Image (spheres, rainbow, N blue to C red):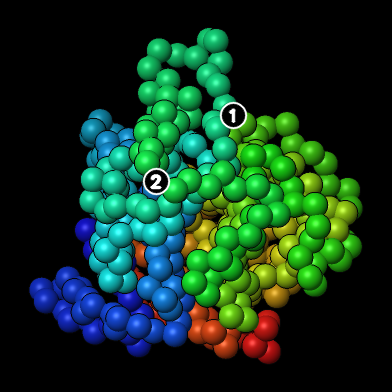
Amino acid sequence: MRAGLLLASVATLVLTGGSPSIAKPPKSSPDLKVISIDVEGGAAVLFRTPEGKSVLIDTGWKPGIGIPYPVGAGAPPIPQPVSADRITAAAAALGVKKIDYLLMTHYHADHLGGTEALLAKLSVDTFVDHGPNRESLAPDAPAGAAENSPQGRYPAWVAAMAGHPHISAQAGQVLDIGSLHILFVTADGNILDTPPPGAGQPNPYCDGVKPMADDGGEENNRSLGMLITFGKTRIVYLGDLTWNKEIALLCPVNKIRKTDIYFVTGHGMNLSSSPPTAALDPLVAIMQNGPLKGGDQEPIRTVMSYPGLQGFWRTHYTVRYPGLNGDPNLIANLDWVPDQGYSIDLDITPAGKITVVNTRNLFSKSYDSRGAQ
């Protein structure tokens, strides 16, 4: 496995037998460091603030489960790499020795599953969630379904945060972590009442959009959604918020305003990425998909249609829709070759310079946030 790399400006790349090793970053930097970690179609994003505070959103899969790699007819699937190992490697690359804030968007297995394995490697100070689990198993659920369901996994989350500071975030609540400002725009199915300054414009992309019946499970509806601000840069992260909740957040007015960086909701699955998300109009989109999970055709087309989009970065090549993959330099892991583990890294200056790096080939591109323009 190749761990996430830091940007060349803050780390020294030493090639030894084809494998990268990373020098530790300086103890202080005025920039925000972000690693979108490859957890194979799950979710895990690590932030390190200039003050040295660490924020992890979600923990990927439990060891031994996830979407297996197909390796040919009759061959057994290759099991998933361990999400906690990849998160730990990303933390080491950023010089992070503990997680100051662990934010759990919701309790599905691809977001919550890696928590216990991670805690065996890194301590967590403060736990943040949307409140209790809201998704119960159907009476006719198959045997064994409970173990990795939200109903089965949530007690482990409760046990993990026992004795630690705990925040059940509310829509409209603010959390400041050093120079990182987080506004929770959704929580537990609720939407913030009052748009932040500069938001609230009518959204023309709402016209004719109909609700969707499928939500993929009630916990998706309850996802923590965040508007994250650092200096002159805005980042939107909505977990697996569903199509209907996106509409509630963005219609008839956009309660967030335009953003600079957008983590594509729900791994780019058909359950999210409704047409009204075009009002977010990001400069940079990052899709946390797997080779076979997420990256659905219509969400990809929707993101590609955003009027101001300058870079559509993806964790994985989309095997099912190769014609929609775009520039391979913006894809961290190509095809479905297992255990690559390349990340998408960002360096964001207070003045709004955003540099994105594909750690597979060290291809990078810089953007100026709207606040810097």
Lateral position of residue 131 relative to residue 318, left or right: right
Vertical placement of residue 253 versus 246, above or below: below
Q: Percent from the top left, x then y, of residue 356?
A: 46, 77
- Residue 173 in sight from this viewpoint: yes
Mark 1, Cα crowd under 10 Å, few <14 / some 14-19 / many 20+, is some
Which residue is drawn at the image coordinates 53% and 70% (left, top)? 180
Which residue is drawn at the image coordinates 27% and 63% (left, top)? 97
The kind of secondary structure element at disc 1 is loop
- Residue 320 in sight from this viewpoint: no
Q: In the picture, which quadrant includes the N terminus?
A: bottom left
Q: Nearer the viewer, residue 243 or 302?
A: 243
Mark 2, Cα crowd under 10 Å, few <14 / some 14-19 / many 20+, is few
Disc 1 residue type (three-letter): Arg
* Residue highlighted by disc 1: 134
The kind of secondary structure element at disc 2 is loop
Q: Percent from the top left, x then y, of residue 40?
A: 38, 49
Q: Percent from the top left, x then y, of residue 137?
A: 53, 19
Q: Residue furthest left?
A: 17
Q: Percent from the top left, x then y, of residue 4?
A: 31, 67
Lateral position of residue 230 relative to residue 206, left or right: left
Please give the count of numbered marks on the rendered protein. 2
Q: Earlier in the sequence, mark 2 or mark 1?
A: 1
Vertical placement of residue 349 versus 300, above or below: below
**In this rendering, the label closer to the viewer, 2 or 1:** 2
Q: In the picture, which quadrant includes the C terminus?
A: bottom right
Q: Nearer the viewer, residue 193 or 337?
A: 193
Whether the residues at callouts 2 and 1 have beta carbons within 8 Å, the answer is no
* Residue highlighted by disc 2: 164
Q: Which mark is residue 26?
A: none
Which residue is drawn at the image coordinates 37% and 41% (left, top)? 163
Q: How many angstroms separate mark 2 from mark 1 (CA)?
A: 22 Å
Disc 2 residue type (three-letter): His
